[in-house]
Each structure stands twice: as structure tokens, then as C-alpha cells.
Image (cartoon, rainbow, N blue to C red):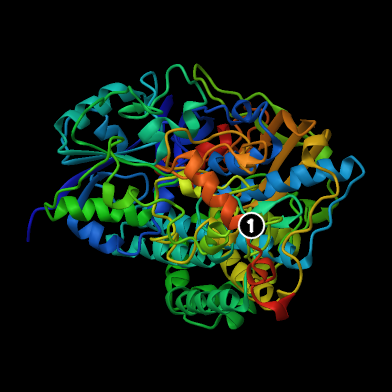
Amino acid sequence: MKPRLKLLWLQGVTCNGNTHSFLNYPHLSYILETFEFLYHPLLPSTYTLEEISTCAHECDILVFEGAYDPRMERVGTSLERVVHHYGNHARYIIAAGSCASFGGMFKHSDPEHITGLGFDEKEPKGPFVKNSKLINLSGCPIHPEWMGYTLRMIADNKPISIDELHRPKELYSYLAHHGCTRNEYFEWKVDSDHFGTKEGCLFYKQGCRGPMTHASCNKILWNDVSSKTRAGSPCFGCTEPDFPRTNMFETKTNMSIPQDVPVGISKRSYLTMAGIAKSFHIPRLEKRLIDDNT
Amino acid sequence: MITRKWIERIEGEASVQFTFEHNKVSFATIAFPHFRGMEAILHARPAMDALVITPRVCGICGHSHLFAAVRAIESVYANSGFPLEISPKAEALRELTLSLELIQNHFKWLYLVIYPELSHLVQCPIADSFRLKGAYAASLATKVLAIFAGQWPHSSYMIPGGVTCDPTYVDTVRAMGLLDELIRWFEKELTGISLEEYLHLSSTKALSRLSGDMGDLDKMLRAANMHKQGFSYDRYCVLGEHGFSKPSKNINKRTTKVNAKQVTLENPYTVDEKTYAKNALYQNNPFETGPLARAIINGIPLIKHLHRSFRDSTYSRIMARSYEIALLLNHCKILLQSIRLDEPSFIEPHKKITSLSGEGVGIVEAPRGPLMHKVTLNKGIIDHYALITPTQWNLASGSPQTPGPAQKAMIGADSIEIATFTFRAFDVCSVCTTH
């Protein structure tokens, strides 16, 4: 049997949501067979956090959850010291979630000091700036399958190609929009009048960031079953460096035109296409999808 | 002699300082060293943003925060003379997904915290794979939850006026299939008898005869003498109103009404140590909250019977919480069957949220007890937001004259190991406590 890779899971300024999201991963027994957890907040581990904090060990993979605050202490030891020690020795550093990737939600606790591991929103900042070992798995929280993919690729010695924000391309080249069950409403510019319907697109009024957000949420479903947009909630863009934005349930518009348009499409092209699509009235898309339930 | 101990393998971390006299814990203080300032993050944001931000208070009970936030905003509507109409369908879905969050939390606490620690205490090691049972059962529960809420953790599908989802019977049938699977798993692994039979048990003797993990739990807890220690105030408080809980307090076996306005906060008591958690009190007194409180107040026969013999021991606390899994599974089944999909998911408020001003309070029962969100809005913008979490009740760090429930429960323990197990029986969550 191959020796197990040593994995250390540390936490900074966090809600523990990435830990709990990863516990939904359906193949945890594979994970425990393949990786030795030096420490994990809940899974069986070799050491206690106090033992880890002595910096007497080394790991192959450092997983870090939560935003990074160099002044923080965990179990009475400087987080900065512990993160540097293990990060410098590790072969891979995985930022689990948007806080660890970009600062995320908890950057707002203290925007001046708190960052991600290699980024402060989009700007390079933090303990592992421009470090080729850093893999950002942004998302609030992390998607369990995305973490599972990354760990298995590492275990199998397969290369993980990353984008300019250090996110694996195979996971983050898609947009949250891809695979959304409301796509046809987007194509023909049929808005959702209000929340609570399976019909209509949430992009025009309800603040949906799906077409601007790099995430495979509608390809690799959440908890194997659904996604925000499938459940009628707008995508809040939680994998992007600017999460959390403000006024997240409303689309920002200028003269009733959405301020932001889909990634990589010029506003002019978008407006031309949208104007034409909107000029058609398509009765099938304007009524309920299944009429006997209404 | 004072000994300081870091408590790990909880949600976050806590520091407990034990005072020993005659080889027994005579006092203990509890400190939570991390603080994120959630209330400040919410300040000056549009009200609806609370539905995205407050679930991020806690990775394990974020859905409870979402529900409390929605109730708080709806209470501002009601207090301003515009009570919102919520369809029975939306009410049922909210309660269903909340119950599922409680279930996943209870499973994880049982298999990832209680069993490993208890097996260590009674020197009966368990396999790593045994602990994964908790994650498996929890993931089945969150799968059902996500069918309606889109995802777990960190869904924002409850909104003032209802819910965002519009399920079809394809969704509810799928949810029932998964819930049935979870119930069958529970019967096979935990009880060895059917859920229905288990829910009809009324005597503690029957518990030790169970063949599954619940039988082992009963035997191990007794072997560790947990039925003879961990006693606290035997005083309980429930503030959230649901199908599975009614707001009441119980003192000296008498259940009476509560008024959430009587909830107050006090500064914590620690020695030479910084903590960010304020103590929550009812009429200036500590109360125990959570599954044991809910069961006592609801008069659940088995738990009442157990309580007669073992009062509020650690054994009672742990058994009450494990038993609540069964109560909630049954509750979910009834809720799922009751949902009528021809009702609206969402009824648009008549008043725009951007013109809404005033105060509101939202209270729900989270896994560990009552969770309160208080909000003041000025034309739809958050002027003030305050959170009072269940762990601020149970894990309050009071003075030697009025220790909090967990502090009191630890007094008299023979060792730090016993005391920390007693502490963990309350299910420690540092992220909620300090927020």
C-alpha cells in the first residue's frame, strides 16, 4: 500500500462552512484511505491542533479554510507562524472557500488586515502571493466535489491547470449560468416577475450573477440535487473576488438595463441581441410551465 | 490549582480554566477568543442582504440563522402595520428544511464528537470509518434540504413573504425517497427497531436493550457514570415556535409561559483571559436550552421518564438530543406529506422593503436552542442588528455565584477529561457564541 499523503486542514477567520460542506462529499472513505489527516477540525486526525502548532511536523498538502489575519492566534499560537511553516513545506496549498481565496465575507471584519492566502479580492496580497503551489477553490462555501476533484488529481499525480486567480480551469471556466434550468428564459429575455416561481430568469430584477460568475454549480449540482438558481434564488457570485457585494437580491440597472452583462460579451452586442429577443412575445414562455398546478 | 485547557474538535475553539479543590473541579470559566463582528458587517446594508450574510455566522447552523433573519424582517413588517401573509406551503417548507438542519447537526455531533470522546473515556476504541456514519447520515439529510433550498450549507431561499423555490411533486417524491432511506438507515444502524416503535418507547430500560448504536451509547454512557454527573440547573427555556417546539420555560418541573422581552445579556466572567461571548439570561437567570429543554417542555414520554431518574445529567442531555433525531425525522415525514404544491411559494409584500422602517425580532429553535435576531431598519437599510445565539445560554461564563449551565454541569467532575466531555455534551459552537 502506498503511504498516505499527509494533509493538514487549518482554519483562519471562518464560519466552518467549508468543513461542513466537505463532509457532504460522498467519497469520504476514499479520502481517509488516501490521505492521512495530520489535523482536521472534525475528521479523525493524527495530532491535536496544539501539537500541530508546535510546527514540529510537515505536510504534503495544506488546506486552509477562512480568511487570513496575520495577527490571529489559534490555540494560543500565532497563525502566521503556523501557516508559513506548513505552507512553505507543502507541495500544494489549497485555499478552501472564498475567504481563504480572496478574503471573502470575513475580510469585511477588518478590511485593512484581513486577506486571502494569495489575494486581497483581486489584488495579490497575503502569505502566498504568486506562489505556484496555491490552488484557490473559491465559493461560499466550497463545493465538496470541487475539493474531491482537486485532492484526487493531486493523489493521482495529474496536473491541475489554473486560471489567473489560481482556480482550477476545469471547475471555474464554466459560469454558474451554464446548465441553469432557466436558460431559455434568459435567451428570450423573459423576466421572473417575482420570487417563488420556476419560470422566468432572475438576471433582470432579482440580482442573479450567474452569467458573470465562474462556477460549475449548475453542472456539478449542490448536494447532488440542486443549485441556488434551480431553487429560485439568484446566484450571488460567491466564487468571485468581490463577494459579498451589496444589495444582493436586486439587479443594478441603468435606465432599466442591467449594469453588468455576461462575461466576455460587449454591452453593445448584448443590448442588440436582447432588444431583438425581447421584441418577440412567446406565449409558451409567458405562462406557467405546467398549467394544471396553477 | 488552576489548569487551562484548549478545547478542540468543536465548532472553532474554546479555552476552559478549571479550578480544582480536593481533586474535583470546583469552578470553571469558559472563554472564546475569536470574534468576527457579524453585526458590524450587517450595518448599513440593505435588509435583504441579511439573508446572505447571517447564514455565514455558522457553517453548521446557518439555515437557522437564515430562518431567524427572515422572521426578524417579517416582524418589522408586522410591527409597521403590514403583516405578511405566508402560505402554509412556504411555512411547511421552512420548517422542513430547518428540521433537516437540526438532524444533520445532531448526527455529526453524535458520531464525530460524542462517540469518539466517549469511546476514549471508556477505553473502547472505535474505527475511523465508524465516525463517517455521522457524515453519511448528515449528507442524506442535507440532500433532502437542498432539493428545496438549493444547497446546504449557506442557502438563502427563505425570503420575506415565503420561499424562492417552486417545487413540483417530482421534487417532493424524490425528497420522500431520500428521507425514507435515511429513516431505514437510522432504524438499522441506531435502534434495531422501527422508527414508530422507537417513538413509542416510554421507559429507559428499553434503551439499553436496543441493538444498534443507541444501545451501545446507553451502555457506554452508563459505564462512564454519565447518569450520575453533569447536573446543572434543571431549568429550561425554549423561545422558538415550531411544530416541534413551543416557547415556554420549565422550573421545578412546572412549565409556564415565556416572553422573549425578558431575555437579557450580561458580561462574561473570566480571569486574565479575553472572551468575546456575552451571557444570555432569562429574567437574569441562567437557563439550559436545546434538545433536552425542548423534550422536557414538550413532555416527550421517554425523556420525561429518563429525567425522573437521572435529572439533567450528561446522560439525559445526550439521550435527549439523540432521541430528537427520531422526533424530527418523523416530523419531516409528516411535513413532506402535508405540503400542497398548488399554494403559492411566495406572496409579494404590499409594502416595498425600501420604504420599511422599524424594529423586529425573529426567533427560531436552532440545533442548540433559541436563536434570536433583532433588527432595526431605516427605509430598508439595516441600522442595527443584534444576534443572541443558543450557546450564549448554555456556554455562558458566569461568576462563581451564578455559573452558566455548562459551567455548573462541570463542577464536581473528577478529571479534566470528564469535565470536557460534560462540556461537549452541550455541543460547543464557538463561531455562534461570539459571532
Q: Residue B359 or A178: which is nearer the viewer?
A: A178
Q: Is residue B100 above or below residue B192?
A: above
| Location of residue A161 (image quadrant) | top left
- Quadrant of the frame with the C terminus of chain A: bottom right
Q: Residue B357 or A10: which is nearer the viewer?
A: B357
Looking at the image, residue B53 sits to the left or right of residue A16; the answer is: right
* Residue at 47% in and 81% down: B192
**Percent of width and height locating residue A34:** 18, 57
Q: Is residue B339 above or below residue B122?
A: below
Q: Identify the residue at the far right of this view.
A: B81
Q: Amino acid at mark 1?
A: Ser
- Quadrant of the frame with the N terminus of chain A: bottom left
Q: Secondary structure at mark 1?
A: helix
Disc 1 is attached to a residue of which chain?
A
Q: Which residue is mark 1?
A: A279
Please indicate, yes or no, whether residue B220 appears anywhere in the rendered image. yes
Graded by Cα atoms within 10 Å as few (under 14), some (14 to 19) or many (20 or more), the crowding at tag 1 reads few
Looking at the image, residue B238 sits to the left or right of residue A140; the answer is: right
> How many marks on residues?
1
**Percent of width and height locating residue B352:** 81, 42
* Residue at 84% in and 57% down: B85
**Percent of width and height locating residue B248:** 80, 52
* Residue at 88% in and 41% down: B79
Please indicate, yes or no, whether residue B154 appears anywhere in the rendered image. no
